[in-house]
Amino acid sequence: MQLKRIEITGFKSFAEKTIIDFHEGVTAVVGPNGSGKSNITEAIRWVLGEQSAKSLRGGKMNDIIFAGTDLRKPLNFAEVTLVLENEDHFLPLDFSEINITRRLHRNGDSEFFLNKQACRLKDIVELFMDSGLGKESFSIISQGKVETIFNSKPEDRRSIFEEAAGVFKYKTRKKKAEQKLVETEDNLSRVQDIVYELDSQIEPLKMQSSIAKDYLMQKEQLSDVEIALTVVEIEQLKNQADSQNQELDSFNQQLKKMQKTSTQLEKELLEVKNEKNKLSEIIDSEQNSLMKVLQYYEQLEGKKQVLNERSKHTKQSRQQYEQQKQVAKEKIGKLSEELKQVTKRMTKKSEDQKTGHSKLKKAQKEQQLLASDSKEISEQLRGNYIDLMQEQTSLRNEQNYLEKSLNQVSQKRLKSTARIATLELEKEQSELKRTKIIVDMKANEQEIAEKILHYQEQQVIVQDKRVHLENENKRMFDALRVVQQAKAKKESLQELTDDYTGFYQGVKEILKHKVKIGGVVGAVAELISVPKESEIAIDIALGAASQNIVVQDEISARNAINFLKQKRSGRATFLPLTTIKPRQLPLSVENKVRNSTGFIGIASEIVEYSKEITSIIHNLLGTTIVAKDLESANSIAKMIQFGYRVVTLEGDVMNAGGSMTGGASKKGNQSSLFSRKNELATLSKQIDQMENKLLTKEAEVRQLKQTVIKEEGKLEKVRELGEQQRLKDQELKNTHTIILEKCDRLVRELKGNQFEEQEERQEESTYTERLKAITEELVILKDKMNQTKRQIEMVSSQDEEREELQATILQTVQELMTSSATIKEQLTSLKNEYNRIENQLVIEQKEVDKLTSFIQEISQSNGDQKISEVDLIAKSFKLKKEKEQVEDSLILHKEKFLLLQEQLSQIEQTVVLKNNQQLYVVEQKTKVEVSLNRNDVRMDNRLVYLNEEYNLTFESAKQQHTLVMKIEEATQKVRLLKLSIQELGHVNLGAIEEFERIHSRYTFLIEQRDDLLEAKESLYETMNEMDEEVILRFTETFNAIRFRFSKVFPKMFGGGTAELRLTDPENVLTTGIEIIVQPPGKKLQQLSLLSGGERAFTAIALLFAIIQVRPVPFCILDEVEAALDEANVVRFGRYLKEFDRDTQFIVITHRKGTMEEADVLYGVTMQESGVSKIVSVRLEETERESMNVVK
C-alpha cells in the first residue's frame, strides 16, 4: 500500500482545492518559512482522525478553516481527502483504492466519508488502528515530536512502541471493557444490596405462604374424600371376596379337569413309550441284520474285486503268452526262411559235387590208363585217405557246432533252474503268508462275532438306563413342582407377615417404624408361639390383645403414641414391661381345674415366649383356662362359679359371670395371626426338607445322566471297534485273495519253467551223447587215416616218370578231390545247419504248442472265472435286493420311530405344559386364597378405622359420603393430604399475599443479578485475554526494536552504542522505556545532556529501527533533520534511500542534503499573501540540480 495523493480544500492556508500526487521513493516538500508546507502534514493527521485543535496549532477546531485574506473571503468549510492505493489489502477493506474524506463546517458540524460513503470518525480511527499509520503513530514525526520523545517520561514514551506493536486496539477495547466493568459492578452492588434485604424476608414468607395454602386446600378435602374412599374400599373388598370365592371354585374345577387330562396324557405317554421301545428293538434287530448283510455284501464285493484282479492278471498273462507265441512264430518264419536258403545252397553244392565227381572220374580214368595195378592200388588208397579226411573234417565241423549248441543249451538250462528256485521260494513264502492270513481271518471273524454280541448287550444296558433316567426325571419334576407350590405359598405368607397384614393400621405403623421410634419389643402375636391344636383357643383368648404392642417402658409408649398422633396413622395399645403386672389363678382354683375332665391347661402355660415378657403373657393369659370342648368348659366354669374365663379348642368361650360366646367364623382359621406364623414355620421346614430331597434327587439324576452318557460312549466305542474289526476283516480277505492269486500265478509260471528246463536237459543230453560218439569216430578215423597213409607210402616207390605223370594227374585228382572234399564238407556243414535249423524249428514249434496250451488253460480259467463272477453278481444282486429291503424296512421303522419320538416329545411337552398350567392354577389359587385372607383382614381394619377415627358405622358413612373421583386418585390424594397436614404445624394465613408481592420483585432482581455476574465474568475474561495479547506483542516488538536500534545507531553516528531498557520488566503492561545512548567519543550520558543534533539524530535512528521492525507503507517526516549539520543531513538522506523500496517517504524539509536524495520535489509558495500554492519537480536519479530554494 502507498499514499497516492491528497486533496486539500479550505484547510488553513490552502484556500483553493490543491491536489498533491505522491510517488514511490522519497518525496520532498520544500518552501520558505511560513509558506504552509507543514500544513500538509497537519492535513494528513487531521483526516486520519486528529481531534486536538492544539496539536494542529489552533485554538479551536474552526481555526483550521481558511479564514480569508485581504483579497479573499473566508470559506465555510474545510475538506481533506486522502487517497490510498490498497492493492495488497494492507488495510482490511475489499477495495484496491481507498478514499478517506473529512469535512468540517463553520457551524461545527463534521462529516466523514470512506470511499464517498458516510461513516463515523470511530470507523476511520479503527481502520488505521495498529497499522502504524494513525494520527499519533511513528509514521508521522515532526521536530516537535522529537522533543516530545526525549522529554517525556519513560512511561509516556512507550506509546510509540505500543503503536509499533499494534496493541492500541487491544488497549482501547480494554478501556471500554473497564468502563463497562465499573458500570456493571456499580449496578451489581445495588442489586445485591436489595437481594440481600429480600433474602431475609422471602424464605420465611415462602414457607408460611406454602403452608397456609396447603392447609386451606387440604383441610377442606381430607375428611370427605377419606371417608368416601373408606366406604368404597369396604364395598370393593366385599365384592372382591365374592369374586375370589368364585375364582376359587373355578380353580378347583380347573384342577379337577387338569388332573383328569394329566392322567390321560400320562397313559398316552406310557403307551407311546412302550411302542417306541418295541420299535427301537425292531430297529436294532434290523440294524444288526443290515450290518450282517452289509458284511456279506462287502465280502462278495471283495471276491468280485479279487476276480476282477485275477481276470485282469489272466488277461495280462494271456497277452504276454500271445506275445511270446507271436515271437516264436516269427522265429519259426525266420528259421523256415533260413532253411529254404540252406536247402538252396545244399542243392547248389550237390550240383557242384556232381560236377567235381565227373571231373574226378575223368582224371582218375586218365590215371588209370597210365597207372598199373599198383598205381590203382595207390590211387585207391589215396582216394580212401581223402574220403577219410573229408569224413574227419565233417565230424570236426559237427563237433564244433554241437559244442557251441551245448554251451547255449547249458546256459539256458542254468537260467531256468535259477528261475525255478526263485519261483519255488516265492511260492513257499506266499503259502506261508496265506496260511497266516487264514488264521488271522478266523480270529478276526471270532472277534467280530464277540463285538456284535457286546454291542447288542450294551444296547440293552443303554436302553434300560434311558428308561430309568426318564422315570427319575419325572419324579424330580413332580418334586420340583411340589417345592414351587410350597415356595409360592410361603412367599405369599411371608409377604403378609412382612407387610404386617392383619394388624390394625396404628399397630402396623408402629411395627414398621419400631427401629426409628425405639424401645418397641413387638406385638404380642409376634412374641409368642402357639401349638397348632391351640391356635383357635389362644386367638380367642387374646382377642384384640394379640395386637397389643410390648414396649420397654412408659417413655417408649409415649413416644410411640406421639408418633401415631404426628402421622395420624391410627391408634394402638401399648404394654410397658415396667408397669404391666402378672395375673394368675388362685392356687385353690388352679388345683380344682387341673383335676377336672377336659382340662387342657392355663393359657399362659400353653404358649411359648421369652422370659423378658413373662409378666405381659401372665397378665393377658394367666387367668384364662383352656378346655377341650364346650361341655368341659361349661363344667369347669360351674366348678369355679363362673369366676374366670374358659376357652375351648374350637373357640367357644365361657365368660366370667356366666355369659357364653360361640359359633362359626366366616374367616375360619386362616385369618389367625398364630396359624399364619405356624404355617409359615411349617412350610419353611417342609421346603428345607423337600429341597434337600430335591437336591439329592437332582444329584441322582445328574449321576444317572452321566451314567447314560458313559454307557452311550461305551456303546459308540463298541460300534467303532466293530467297524474297525469289519474293515480289518475286509482288508484280510482282500490280502488273502491277492496272495491266492499270486500263488496260482507262481504255480503256472513254475510249471512252464520246469517244462522248459526238462526239454533243455533232454537237448543237453542229446548233444553230449552225440559229441561222445563223434569223439570216438574221430579216433577210429584217425587210425584208418594213419594206416592208409602208410599203405600209400609203400605204393609210392615207383619210377619217376610214371610218378611225375601220375603226380600231375594225381595233383589234378587231388585238387579235384580237395575241391570235392571241400564241397562235401560244405555240404555237410549245410546239412548240419539244416539239421540245426530244423531242430530249432522243432523247439520253437514246441514253444508255440506250449504257449497255445497255456493260452487254452487261461481261456478255460477265464471261463471258470466268468462263471464265478456271474455267480458272484447273482449273489451280490440278491444281497443288494435283500439289503434294500432291509434298508427300506429300517427307513420305514425309523420314520415311524421319529414320528413316535415326535409324538412322544409333543405329549411330553403337553404334559409339561399341562403341569405348568396346573402349577400356575395352583399358584393362582394360593394367591387368591392369600388375597381373600388379606381382604378379610383389611375389611376388619377399615371398619375399625371408621369407628376409631370418625366414630361412624359403615351404613352411616355410606349414606353421608359419596366418592366423586377415581379410587386411585382418591387414595393418593388422602395419603398426600394426611402427610401434608401433619407436616404443616402452625399456619400463618396472611403470609400468602405478602409472599406473592415480595417474590415477584425478588425474581426480577435475581435475574438482573445473574445477568450482571455473567457480564462481569465475561468482561474479566476479555480483559485478561487482551492483557496476554498486549504483553506478547509488546515484548516481541520491543525486543526487535531494541536489537535494531542497537544496530542502526552506530551505523548512523559512525560509532557509539545505544540501548533501550524497560524500567519495570516484571510489569510489561505499565513499564516505561529508557533510551541509553553513547555517541562516538563520548561517555554514556543522559538524553537531556545531548545536543539538539544528537537528540534529533537519535530520534531518527529510533524511527528507522522501528520501521525495520514494523515496516509502514509511508512515513511523513516534518523537518526532523533541522538541527543536524550538513554531514549528518547527507547521511540522513542516504539512509532514507535504503528504506524507500519498502516505505514511501514524504519529507518536509529545507535542507539541501535531503533535497538531493529526493525523487520528487514539491515547492510550497505564497504568491498570494495567505494562500499556499504547490509547484512540483520530478528529478532524474542520474543528474540532480542543486537547488537553493530557501533564500
Image: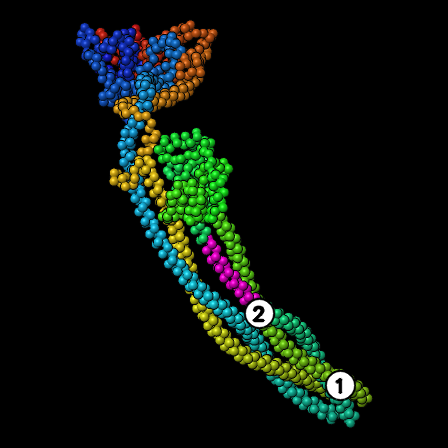
Going 41% across and 56% down the picture, which residue do you hit?
915
Q: Which residue is mark 1?
A: 777
- What whole-number distance in Å separates the C-alpha atoms at marks 2 and 1? 80 Å
- Residue 906 visible to the viewer: no
Q: Is residue 471 magenta?
A: yes
Instruction: Find residue 198 and report its image quarter.
Output: top left
Going 49% across and 46% down the picture, which residue do you hit?
595
Residue 1175 in percent (x, y) is at 26, 13
Q: Which residue is mark 2?
A: 449
Q: Which residues are magenta?
A: 452-480
Going 73% across and 93% down the picture, which residue do you hit?
369
Residue 808 in percent (x, y) is at 74, 86
Vertical placement of 532 versus 307: above or below? above
Residue placed most toward the observer, 79 or 1028:
1028
The colouring scheme, among rainbow, by chain, secondary structure or one colour, is: rainbow
Prevailing SS of the magenta stretch: helix
Vertical placement of 202 versus 1117: above or below? below
Which label belongs to residue 853? Answer: none
